[in-house]
Amino acid sequence: MSAKNVAACAATVLALAGGFAAPSSAQPGPNALDALCGTLGWPRALPDVTGQFLSQTIRLGALGCWTNVRGVAPDGGDPVSSPTGTYRTDFRISAMSPSPGMTARRDEMVTLQLTPLDPTTPTGVQPCDWVSADEAGALLGGPVHAEPLGDEAGSVDISCSYSRGLGDTGMQSELRLPQSFPVSAAAQLEMATRGKNGTAVDGVGVTAQCVSEQTTTPPSSTLVVLLGGNRLYRVTSWYGTSCDELKHFAQIAIGRIGA
């Protein structure tokens, strides 16, 4: 894992530890998730999250519906509830209690044993191969730098960031796997696009919505695509990329990922 990837993971887990999701477009807010979780049958079986990154598992991840999750770092501290800035690295979940598959109430304590991420862990996938830097540059109007994130083994939220190095001009291409959702990919898409300035987009994935968020800083457009196998693909661009352009980008990526 590169130093930049470690920093990105650290920023994410610090945001999560402070109780806030890392900023991104077309994401469901905590109130929407809480409402959805409240409709589920409880107690319910715990998913198996061993081997996953802590930052991808709590809050908006697979354990997002459980309200009493704690982590145990090697120093005995709890990165989940510690003040922002206490821990500057992400962690991998090595064990959990209760065990995967056991039923637990929504407010029942779920304890995660944690180990630091190993920066020498080999990558598992190559997300920047889904759309090459040249292909992304053609859309963004010039050469781009491509940086993979979450490409290590065990990651369930995998992305590639493309930047022209001009302020916030850039794109992010992201694939979320089945183990990343608190409920399901379909529920995540519905939450992410509900009440937004969204438009249905045909011809890509099972179903897709393009969301324009021009009041955010920077203004952005996001195409969220439901894929087969309980997966979700998302591409976000800042500053004026059209839904048609995002659709073309997504078609290239999904053609290589698999619909």
Image (tube, rainbow, N blue to C red):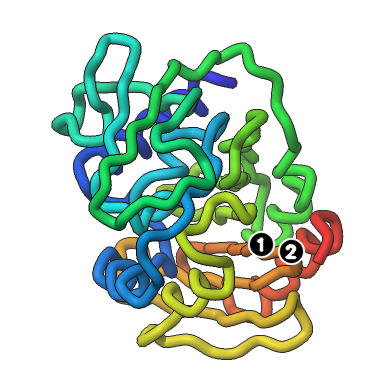
- Among the 4 quarters of the image, the one containing residue 251: bottom right
Contact between labelled residues 2 and 1, with CB atoms less than 8 Å apart: yes
What count of labels does the image hold?
2
- Which one is nearer the viewer's eye here, 60 or 96? 96
Element type at marker 2? Answer: loop
Q: Is residue 208 visible?
A: yes
- Which one is nearer the viewer's eye here, 157 or 197? 157
Dot 1 alpha-carbon crowd within 10 angstroms: few under 14, some 14 to 19, many 20 or more: many
Mark 1 belongs to which amino acid? Arg
Quarter of the image with the N terminus is top right
Task: Give the farthest residue toward the left.
Answer: 83
State the residue at coordinates (62%, 33%): 154
Dot 2 alpha-carbon crowd within 10 angstroms: few under 14, some 14 to 19, many 20 or more: few
Element type at marker 1? Answer: strand
Residue 249's tag is none
Give the labeled residue for mark 2.
229
- Among the 4 quarters of the image, the one containing residue 235: bottom right
State the residue at coordinates (39%, 72%): 40
Give the labeled residue for mark 1.
231
Q: Position of residue 149 (x, y in %)?
A: 57, 37
Q: Position of residue 89 (x, y in %)?
A: 37, 22
Q: Is residue 5 left or right of residue 70?
A: right
- Relative vertical location of residue 9 with respect to residue 89 in this rendering, above or below: below
- Which one is nearer the viewer's eye here, 137 or 82? 82
Quarter of the image with the C terminus is bottom right
- Relative vertical location of residue 209 with respect to residue 232 in this rendering, above or below: below
State the residue at coordinates (78%, 63%): 254
Mark 2 belongs to which amino acid? Gly
Q: Is residue 136 left or right of residue 156?
A: right
